[in-house]
Structure formats: structure tokens, C-alpha cells
Image (cartoon, rainbow, N blue to C red):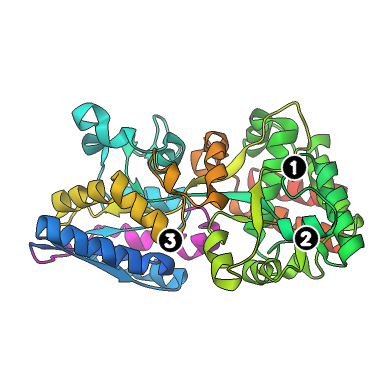
Amino acid sequence: MLKKGKWGKILLCLFIITSGCTSSHKPTKEKLIIWHWMVDRQDAFQKLAKEYEKESGINVEFKLFFPPDIYSQKVIAAARAGTLPDIFGILGEKRTFASFIKAGHILDLTPYMKENDSSWQKIFYPQTLRLVVFKDNNTYNIKPGIYGVPIDTTLLSFIYNRTLFKKAGLDPDTPPQTFEEFINDAKIVKNKLGVDGFVCGWGEGWLLNALATEWAINLMGEKKFLQTIEGKIPYTDSDWIKVFSYFAILREAGILAEGIATMTNKEAEDAFSKEKAAFSFNGSWAVNVYRKLAPNLDYAFFPLPKVSDEFPVKVWGGAGSSFMVNARSFNKEKAVKFLRWLTAREQQKTLIKETNNLPSVKNCEEELPLVLKNLTSEFGSFTHPDIWPKNEHSQVIEVINRGLQQVVMGIKDPEEIAKDIQKIKERIHR
């Protein structure tokens, strides 16, 4: 669910899923149908499905629809027609998730999670599970409960190339801890080796937004950050101008890859895999990407370079992918039973081995590849729009992202974009 902003626009026409359809998917009694978009997991899913059939006698079919926007369109159409499968996932913002629940398409899993002294609920990392939870007095007016089953955890982190560190005379076991150290190390690599200091897919605004969010929370604290979303603090506040200034400082330092403001994440991943940059900012899924592009690449993740010691670092992360049960399915009890099996430790270990994704359940750390193992220490620091009490308006987010791209390109300065952002914020809330 972490990259869903990219697909959220597809799902904003939510009226099409609240048409009150009462028909439902009618599978055979001993078969479960699951829809998903995860290309990298299809083989592992099919392997697990065969294991489950041997154990239970129930056939499970994972149907893959790709790319994600096609998948999203199919789910919307099925919701409108009342033909959703037994189990499916949702790509989109939390308001999209809420709209499916309001329309009666998603089963409340709370009773199942809570039975036997909450034995199922307790196996999950709470930071991962909370992305599929609606709390009391939520802004969507959804009955409090657990409405999804996370199958992995995703987070965004900085990455550095250990080989380039060695060649530049830097300690490959000591990544930078502060913003200043990060710039200094990037400059050293660029000056000594002639490669870029930093590459990222900033043509995709969500990556810029996530990084700006992390620096903002570290600089001003989560309380003030959230007060900005609520309209109590303006984006022209001095702390916000500082946040926007960090991107200007990166540009002025001369460490950014050429064309970074229009670069896609795939292009950035390709450049980093070819050792064209010392640093990048990407998701934990990059392990799979780099494994395919450059199996021998020597790299490691490290925490956000801090801009302040006053407030803790928060990491953009949570449930990467989650499954929901069709509330109208004739097989909903069997679907719940299968998801309980899928998230058990042995099955999670299989997914780790097959896909190199972080698990959604605890006590699987020993199965993680070394490059991912250290990331579990950041699970306690997650932040994400889906767990905030209120989200920023999409138009404001677009202006923030576009403004940061303009700062990176040297078209506008931080003060100018702060005024642009506040102007649209005030116009929306008039």
C-alpha cells in the first residue's frame, strides 16, 4: 500500500463502487480465487497454493493482473458488478480503502484477529498491521476494526554503494549519519571517482514527498508537521522553508544526478545498479530490483541523514501489500482460514526466501538476507499518511511535489514554493 499515491487518482471516482450491488462472486465450494498485482511474488504464491491444497484439499488460485493501474481498474469494475473474488488487494489511498468497506465489499476481520486471546493479531508487527486498521473516531466514519491482512512490510531508506566508498577512501561500514556528512561523503565520491553523489526517481513526486516528510518530521517534530496538515501552521513557517531549502542545498552541492527532477524510479534504480551514483533513496523492494540488475552489487541501507537532534527520525513505511476478504463471498470463512495460514511463520519464511521482502509477522528475522536484516530495527519509527489522523489535500501535495522539482532544477527558491503551497492550501480551505 506504500506506493499507492501513484494509483490513487485512478480510484478517486469512488461512486462506481458504491452502487449497492448485491450480487457476489460464486466460486466452487473447494476453490478460493485471489486477485493481485505482485509480479515478483506470483511464483511463490503458486508454490504456497500447492502446499495448502495438499494440507487442506482446497484449491487456491492466484490470478495476476499487471500493471497495477490495470489491476486497479479491474477491481473497481468487479466491485461495481459485484464479482470480486474471495480475496483481493486494494491499491489507493486510505479513503479508497474506506469506500470499499462502506460499500460492503470488505469483511471486518476483527473477530478473527481477536479470537483465542488475539493469537492471530499478535503475530504481526503492530506498525505494519495498523495500516489496515481503522481506529475510533476516524475521519472516514468506518466502524473501528481490522479490515486487511498484511503479507509484507515496506519502508523507504537511504542506500549507499560500499564499493564506491572503498574506492573513494571512505569507510564502507560507516555511512553518514547527518545531512552534512551525507553531502560531504557524496562530494568526496564525486570528486575522486567522477560519479554522481546521489540519484533518485524524483520525476515521481511521491519519492520527493516522502523524503520531504521525513526531514520535516525530524526538523519540527511530528506534532507540528501534523498541525500543518490541519491548517494550524502555514507552509510559509520558517521550519518549512528550511525543509524546502535542503533540496536547494543538495542542488548547490553539485552532487545530484543530471536530470534527477524528471527521472523515473526505474531509471534511478538502473543508474544505481550500474554504480553511477554513491547514494540513492528507495524502498526495501530495491533488493529484488538490484538482484536482477546487478547480482554482485555491494550496497547497504542506512537511516535518514538527520537534520536535527531535537526530534526523532521517522521512516516512511508500513504494510507493503495486504489482502482483504470479500464480505459477500460464499467462501469467506475459508478465505479467512487461508490468510491465517499464509501469514503463519513458516509461510512467511517461504515468502522471504522466494521474494526478499520484509515480513509482516514477527520472529522471522533470521531468514532475512543480511542487506535487509538491519531494516527491522526501523520498524518502531514508521510514519505514513494512512496512520495520520488527517491527510493533506491531493492538490496541495501536487504543488509541494512540483515545487520541490522546481527547487531541484533551480527554477524557484524555497521561499517562492512555500508561498505557492500556502496559497493553494488557503484556497482549498476557504
Q: Name the residue beneath numbered marker 1.
A: 305
Tag 3 near tag 1, CB within 8 Å: no
Q: Give the percent coordinates (x, y) of residue 67.
A: 45, 73
In the image, the segment drawn in magenta is 1-28
Q: Residues within 10 Å of mark 1 (few under 14, many from 20)?
A: many
Q: Give the percent coordinates (x, y) of residue 312.
A: 67, 30
Residue drawn 68% across the image and 67% down it: 268
In the rendered structure, does residue 14 fall within the stretch colored magenta? yes
- Residue 69's place in the image compared with 22, above or below, is below
Q: Give the percent coordinates (x, y) of residue 247.
A: 81, 52
Name the one closer to the observer, 347 or 149.
347
Q: Is residue 83 left or right of residue 387?
A: left
Q: Name the residue beneath numbered marker 2.
A: 164
Whether residue 138 can be seen here: yes
Name the one closer to the observer, 233 or 181.
181
Q: Residues within 10 Å of mark 3 (few under 14, many from 20)?
A: some
Q: Give the percent coordinates (x, y) of residue 149.
A: 33, 47
